[in-house]
Image (cartoon, rainbow, N blue to C red):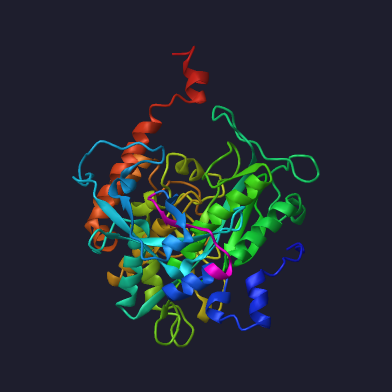
Amino acid sequence: MPSRKKVVTPTIEKAARSTKIPPAISVPRGVKTWKDAADWLRARGIEDIECITPDLAGVPRGKMMPSSKFTSNTSLALPSALYRHTISGDYPEETGNFRYEPRDSDLKLVPDLSTLSVVPWESDPTAQVICDIVGSTGENVPYTPRNVLKNVVQMYRERGWKPVVAPEIEFYLVAVNDDPDYPLHPPKGRSGRAIQGGQGYSIAGINEFDELIDDIYHFSEKQGLEIDTLIHEEGPAQLEINLRHGDPIELADQVFLFKRTIREAALKHGIYATFMAKPMQGQAGSAMHIHQSVVELDTGRNVFSNTDGSPSKEFFHFIGGMQAYVPKTLVMMAPYVNSYRRLTPDMSAPVNNAWGYDNRTTAFRVPVSDAAARRIENRLPGSDANPYLALAASLGCGLLGIMNEIEPSPPTEDTANEGTIDLPRGLLEAVSLLESDPALADVLSAEFIGLYAGVKRGEFETFMQVISPWEREFLLLNV
């Protein structure tokens, strides 16, 4: 890891060490009470606050308001149709279990004060807070992404367990492209030349974008977001950020905010950051690998290990559950037509549902570790996935394996990426698989599955309206 420029300590945090500013409002991220929130905003001179929540695609939606209005018990609402439109902003036709709420009634935004933080790239003092979604009378809304993940985590809690995750997020830096008909290209670095591929773990590759990366670190520190490591990946100007392990909801929140942070830092330097799964033809795709383990709530003991350090039956059943159900929930980890361009043979992504010890060609890799850190890495999700939904699907599949005592296949010792592709090859097939198994509705909710499937079919129909360069190249004069 190259050395980084020293980041100036935020004013409030520095002042807290030399004055009597309460610790509750000196932290960069999160408060416990509305009084603390008012004091926190006042201490920083915050003028505006963004109340945001992820839609099905993981795009921040919400409302901005003066901070004085935010702390005055204002009721915030969004229309329910917000969770029924596609990534292109279209509203699909009703089909199957996909239905619109007859009145398009309001859903209420409930700020989660533990996520309160500044928006460091704004010129005016601005804060942000992630909100939960409830019905107009406070009832549970099972189909919103944060709620889907919360429901899965609650199923673990009911068994006295807590899942622990650590996401790894890959993304590309690309030159500004204002015409979608033209391919993307890597940007010029500080050397004045565009970086080429094959630079995995290159320190020089990171240093090409040193000032941008400094801004990512600076913006992250201001928001109380903690980066574990940062590396250059195989693709040209492809980077990876690894986050420290922790609570799934907190980590999904961090990925949600990191995506926004990285895009804003890139824009500051006149380039784009993209989390498309396959932005460049012939180059590696971008993944969001998820490391997962389960611990006991009262003791913190790793459920995947027996007291003698050997793998437990829950460890193997979790793997068995992922093998059985992840292919059926793949559309939550590979949510777009483009996602399946990444999941192709002879590339860096797995195209199987095999598992193995320290085997990166398998979908489910068990890294080398001691018994306390025993974990399973799901290598299938793309960085284009909504982090809340990808985590919910992965953890839900593992839990189904434990509940149903599903035995896994033997571990794969050799390359697993040769031969038959064990995953759906396209969006429509993946959508149908999500709807095919009643057990998934028990974990994810039937309402979510019906809504999500309808939106994904709508996105596919929109994609089918676009004529690609391949069609013009090979069909125009040949058929």
Viewer-closest of 417 and 443: 443
**Is 439 displayed left or right of 175 in the figure?**
left
Range of residues picked out in magenta = 42-56
Q: Quadrant of the C terminus?
A: top left
Q: Is residue 45 magenta?
A: yes
129 in the magenta segment: no
Q: Quadrant of residue 280?
A: top right
The residue that appears at 66% across and 70% down in the rendered structure is 11
As drawn, the residue found furthest toward the right would be 191
Residue drawn 27% across the image and 58% down it = 440
From where the camera sits, is residue 367 visible?
no
Picture quadrant where residue 326 is located: bottom left
Residue at 50% over, 54% down: 416
Residue under the image location 40 percent in, 48 percent down: 423
Image-based side of 25 in relation to 188, left or right: left
The quadrant of the picture occupied by the N terminus is bottom right
